[in-house]
Structure formats: C-alpha cells, structure tokens
Image: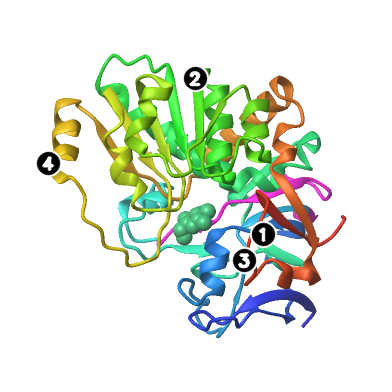
Amino acid sequence: MEIMKAITIKPGVKNSIEMRDAPDPARGDDNVKVKVLRVGLCGTDADIYAGEYGEAPPGDDYLILGHENFGVVEETNGNSGLRRGDYVVSTVRRPCGKCLNCQQGEMDFCSSGDYTERGIKGRHGFMAEYYTESPEYLIHIPPALRDVAVLLEPTSIVEKGIDHIYLIQRRISWQPKRALVLGAGPVGLLAAAVLRVRGLETFVAGREPSTDLRAQVAKGLQASYLSVDGMAITDLPGKTGPLDIVIEATGVSSVVFGAMQILAPNGILCLLSVTGGTGVRPEPTDRINQDLVLGNNVVFGSVNANPRHFRKGVEDFQSLEKSYPGVLQKLITSRLPWHDYGQWFGQKRTGIKTTLEISTG
Ligand code: BGC
C-alpha cells in the first residue's frame, strides 16, 4: 500500500489535528485520481478542530479534513470525460442512498440525515496529497480560473441559496431590484458577487470599517459597503431603501431576528450561517410575526449545494472575471504552505480567505 501525507483530526477531540501518513487511495476502475493543489479553510473546519462537529468514516478513528478544494487529474480511464492534467473541484456531499431526494441526485436535500460529506461527516476530505472520486462529483475547471477555483465550493452554497430565492418567488410576479448581504466574510462577499452578476443593486453590511479590504472588494464589485458595527439591523433599510432580498451570512444567529424585520413587501430572507452554539435570547416576537405576515415575506434556510450549483458558479466566475477582473482573487488574503496549518487552526483569524497550498502541480 502506498502512503501519502494528510492533515487529520480525531472527531470530537479538541486540538487533535496532526499531519500524518495515510493510505494513498487506489483509483478503482470507474474513479478518477486527483492530485490536490490547494484547499480553502472555513468556519466548519474550525468547528471540527474545536471538537464540536465532524465524524470519521466507518472503520477509521480519524478524519482527513478539508472540503473547499482544487486539484488536477492524475489518473483516469477513458470514460470519465476528464483527461490527465484537467483541473477539477470536487463537490462535498454524497447521497444516503435511501431517501427520495438522494435517489434523484438532490443529496443537498437529503431527508434521512444519513448523507456523508467529504472532510466533514463520515468521509475523508481533501487535505491530503491525493483523493479518488467518481467523475459525476467532479467539476471541470477552465485553466483561466485556476487561481480562484478554490472559492468554488463556498460559491456553490451561495448559488444554491440564490437559485432557491428565485424558485420560491415564482409564487408571485416579482422583479427584485435591491439586495442586502449581512456579513462580509467569504460567503457574504461571494453572495454579493453573484447578486451583482444577476444585475441587482447590492449592499454588503459588515462590522469592519470602510477602510477594510472587505469594503474594497465590495466596491470592486460595484456593491455598496455599509460599516454597521453597533448599528441596529432594523435601521438598515433607512440607508438602503426597500430590500427585496436579504442574505444572512454573518455566522451569528441573533442577527436573523433583525433580518426578519427589514424585508420589503413580498421580500425574501435566505439564511446561510451554520451556527453550532446553544445561544438563547429574548426577541420581539409579535413584531417579527406581524412584519412577516403583513409583508407576505419568506424566510428559508439553505445548506450545501448540488453539482449544478458548482457549474453555475464556474459560469458566474467567468462573468465576474470579465466584468470585475481580479476581484475574486482579492478574497484570498493568505496562502499558507500546508505544513504551516498551525498558523490558522486555533489562531485568531484575520483576512478574508486563507488557503493551504498542497502542491504546485
Ligand atoms: C459546507 C457545506 C456543508 C455544511 C454543513 C459547510 O461548511 O460548505 O458543504 O454542507 O458545512 O456540514
């Protein structure tokens, strides 16, 4: 058995991260073997590192971390539609095999809860030299996007949310004009980017001052950045005008209740933050209910994404590179050699997106 390096944790055990030897996966007949070039780091990785989330694959007591990924095809057979040297991004979730949604390829809507997710739940991830995968879960990346393709997985989350905003709103004649994104982290800024591609007037609200790089990224997308530290969320429409779409991406659950009160009539709020804590707070429930009912408003949560949302992300990246050249690249504020993973895990995080550089190809 061949051996490779991988970054692993023991799920449920705080600070158990280590770089270790793991079996180099053999390609199986129908699979593709991919050499990992880089992975992105996100809040979910931090939660798994803290022992609050994550599950090892059956039979292993460790999990190879990493779900935001970018790599190059190392080996494939003739039937995969891919060739050695092609760039690829893998999707994250795999079906449970039992529920109707999974059977129809909609595993992001798995209803049994028995799905697996690479690098997160019951399936090894991408912080390793190699992985193997069935071609149906691999998204072919045009070479021009090689520097930004590691942002595709978080973009797929946003693409799904926005896709479903429009699907749900087919309930009425709806011509949205203005959107607000709460949170200026990678997901918030990528949401702003996709909303701009859809032609919406877009606002991004963040805690950071307007001199921060996040504000520059928003400006580079011709979106308006609102520095809102200490401001009540309910005051935001006074600055933006009526809001047809609000996307919540702060990672702070209490923000959601303010966000429910700022929608224009018929407006829709999409919740994207995964918040693992146990916070409890009093909220103005009569007002929230009254606003939602009288406004015919919709509030919905959205997690993970389907392969088609990754493909839509590729299309939007191409439009973004044309309309706002170089802006996506600005989101990647730190590229660490992967041996230096300890500079991110367990540290106070700064910047927008950090990647671990695993191989140069
Ligand atoms: C990932 C999703 C995943 C979710 C819940 C997020 O960080 O981007 O793919 O479904 O965590 O595990």
Instruction: Give the labeled residue for mark 4.
Output: 286
User: Which residue occupies the foreground of this view, 217 or 39?
Assistant: 217
Instruction: Give the labeled residue for mark 3.
Output: 125
The span shown in magenta is 73-96
User: Which residue occupies the foreground of this view, 29 or 243?
Assistant: 243
Numbered-mark total: 4
Asked where in the image residue 268 lies, by quadrant, the reply is: top left
User: Marks 2 and 1, how far apart in space?
Assistant: 41 Å
| Mark 4 or 1, nearer chain start | 1
| Mark 3 or 1, nearer chain start | 1
Badge 1: residue crowd in 10 Å (few <14, some 14–19, many ≥20): some
Are dots 3 and 2 in contact, CB under 8 Å?
A: no
Q: Quadrant of the N terminus?
A: bottom right
Report if residue 153 lies within the magenta region.
Answer: no
Q: Nearer the viewer, mark 3 or mark 2?
A: 2
User: Which residue occupies the foreground of this view, 299 or 72?
Assistant: 299
Instruction: Give the labeled residue for mark 1.
Output: 31
Q: Nearer the viewer, mark 4 or mark 2?
A: 4
Q: Find residue 2 and name its label.
A: none
Instruction: Give the labeled residue for mark 2.
Output: 200
Give coordinates of residue 156: x percent, y percent.
Answer: 54, 42
